Amino acid sequence: GDSVTQMEGPVTLSEEAFLTINCTYTATGYPSLFWYVQYPGEGLQLLLKATKADDKGSNKGFEATYRKETTSFHLEKGSVQVSDSAVYFCALRGGADGLTFGKGTHLIIQP
Amino acid sequence: DVKVTQSSRYLVKRTGEKVFLECVQDMDHENMFWYRQDPGLGLRLIYFSYDVKMKEKGDIPEGYSVSREKKERFSLILESASTNQTSMYLCASTVGGDYGYTFGSGTRLTVV
């Protein structure tokens, strides 16, 4: 079945550091890929998405490129802020049966 | 903005009780989902529904049932709560396709 693997963390960075959170997936066919963010005490929010190979999703300074050859969708940001502290989930939609999520990466940004 | 409202943020129930978790969305979405979120396990799909009165099992339906009598409301039912159902429960809805899901704020259920 479909699966998503991401680094679990916690990942601790200083403010203004460069961020990469790795995500790789296993799926049949051509899934759509998503990154969601969960701030403390809240539900998940869609951060960005990409629906076909080589697409780049971007939002709020975050970017991720759909790499079919490496089955990856790594999340990057050039300069993180304390307000980016949250849990980040990589997910895929392979078919009609809901999204498949990774286990989440807890990101902590220190001032 | 689409809103998905879960009726309770925190619940404490006793083992063996029948528990109802309610979810309401206000944007006429066809598709609704229930996930549970546990540390180290991420989100796991319990049940989903693509239309009124229809339901489909997700990855972990055992011990749960659902009800969708109206399009905007999707209820998760724990027939006889057990301590291993202590978890964060998240409801989501979407119009479908590659549109993102809108999640509720979650219900943290503790079964004692």
Image (cartoon, grey):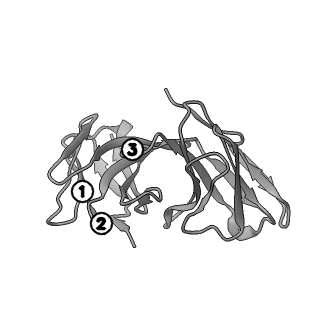
Report the residue at 38% width, 69% height from top: A2
Q: To which residue does mark 1 refer?
A: A73
Who's the residue at 34% across and 49% down the image? Answer: A35
- Residue B78: % across, % down: 75, 61
As helix, strand or loop, the secondary structure at mark 1 comes to loop
Which of pointers 1 and 2 lies earlier in the amino acid sequence?
2
Residue B60 place in picture, x, y as percent: 59, 69
Tags 1 and 2 touching, CB below 8 Å:
yes
Badge 1 and badge 2 in a common chain: yes
Numbered disc 2: secondary structure: strand
Figure quadrant of residue A60: top left
Mark 3: which amino acid?
Ser
How far apart are labels 1 and 2 at the CA level?
8 Å
Give yes or no for contact between labels 1 and 3 (Cβ–Cβ under 8 Å): no
The residue identified by callout 3 is: A85
Circle 2: is it few (<14), some (14-19), or many (20+) Cα within 10 Å?
many
Q: Nearer the viewer, residue A98 or A21?
A: A98
Spatial separation of the CA atoms under disc 1 and disc 3: 20 Å
Label 1 chain ID: A
Q: Residue at x 24, y 56 (%)?
A: A73
Residue A25: mark in rendering: 2
| Number of residues whose C-alpha sits closer than 10 Å to that of mark 1, classed few (under 14), some (14–19) or many (20 or more) | many
* Mark 1 on the same chain as mark 3: yes
Q: Amino acid at mark 2?
A: Tyr
